[in-house]
């Protein structure tokens, strides 16, 4: 049963390709709804994941990585990412600290947020893979941008720092009725989720000739108790 006094809102997960957005979403939702590979451009559309914490329901929007588009599919993916950010109550920028502090794609994102006047929350991801002194340097570099309400150091893979980040995001949600049923984890139909998992396996197994434009159509679907 839905609590009487509730909060609900949208949080957009944005960042350059392959920074760990989908991994973080799956951790918050506690269910695999967004496929994860080491290939860039794995997420192609906006995927919504629902997380409930006490009286608060957060709808996380996992957006495609923002990069410089060269093809029509690329442009559509980037447009979907920016639309997801524009519609959100909170924008969460996820950065991979193993890369250059602010690379070209991340610079495009920061400049885009500056242009629209949007502030953001910063999550420095993969902290378990870098030295503490490097992490401090990266944090200081982002701080100079003057657009982040809070900065969190996390590992979406191991979960380090994720509880503190989630608690903060919960505190930012506005009062209002829940947007999805209490047992919902995503707005993706099961058939589409199955197709995404199939596409994940395709991307994991193909290397030299990876068909980024490939789509998967589920012809048969059955549910089992196990």
Image (spheres, grey):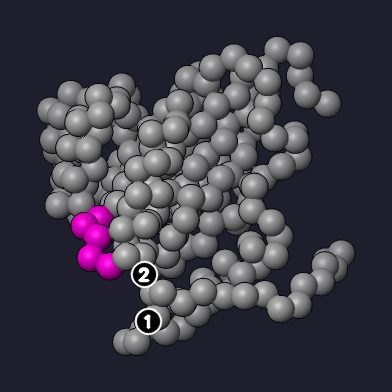
Q: Which of marks 2 and 1 is in front?
A: 1
**Residues in magenta?**
67-71
- Residue 62's x, y, as percent? 47, 47
In the rendered image, residue 68 lying in the magenta stretch gets the answer yes
**Majority secondary structure of magenta residues:** loop
Quadrant of residue 93 in the image? top left
Mark drawn on residue 132 = none
Quadrant of residue 115 in the image? top left
**Dots 2, 1 in contact, CB < 8 A:** yes
- Nearer-the-camera pick, 112 or 51: 112
User: Is residue 14 at least partly visible in the picture?
Assistant: no
Q: Mark 2 points at which residue?
A: 39
Q: Residue at x 57, y 36 (%)?
A: 59
**Element at badge 2?**
loop
- Identify the image quadrant of the N terminus: top right
Q: Name the residue under label 1.
A: 210
User: Is residue 124 at least partly visible in the picture?
Assistant: yes
Q: Is residue 34 left or right of residue 180?
A: left
Q: Is residue 174 above or below residue 191?
A: above
Q: Residue at x 76, y 14 (%)?
A: 4
Mark 1 closeness class: few <14, some 14–19, many ≥20 residues within 10 Å:
few
- Identify the image quadrant of the C terminus: bottom right
- Nearer-the-camera pick, 79 or 202: 79
For this orientation, the residue located farthest to the bottom is: 208
Q: In this view, does 74 lie to the left or right of 9?
A: left
């Amino acid at each position: 049963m839905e609590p009487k006094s509730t909060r609900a809102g949208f949080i957009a997960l944005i960042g350059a390709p392959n920074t760990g957005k989908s991994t973080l979403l799956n951790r918050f939702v506690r269910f695999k709804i967004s496929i994860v590979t080491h290939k860039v451009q794995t997420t192609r559309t906006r995927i919504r994941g629902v997380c409930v914490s006490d009286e608060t329901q957060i709808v996380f929007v996992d957006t495609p990585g923002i990069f410089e588009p060269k093809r029509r599919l690329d442009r559509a993916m980037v447009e979907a990412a920016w639309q997801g950010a524009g519609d959100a109550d909170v924008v969460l920028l996820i950065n991979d600290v193993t890369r250059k502090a602010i690379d070209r794609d991340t610079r495009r994102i920061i400049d885009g947020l500056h242009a629209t006047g949007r502030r953001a929350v910063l999550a420095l991801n993969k902290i378990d893979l870098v030295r503490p002194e490097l992490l401090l340097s990266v944090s200081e570099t982002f701080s100079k941008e003057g657009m982040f309400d809070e900065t969190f150091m996390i590992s979406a893979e191991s979960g380090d720092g994720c509880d503190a980040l989630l608690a903060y995001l919960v505190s930012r949600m506005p009062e209002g009725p829940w947007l999805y049923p209490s047992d919902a984890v995503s707005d993706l139909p099961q058939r589409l989720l199955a197709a995404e998992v199939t596409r994940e396996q395709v991307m994991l197994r193909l290397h030299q000739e990876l068909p980024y434009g490939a789509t998967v159509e589920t012809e048969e679907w059955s549910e089992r108790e196990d």
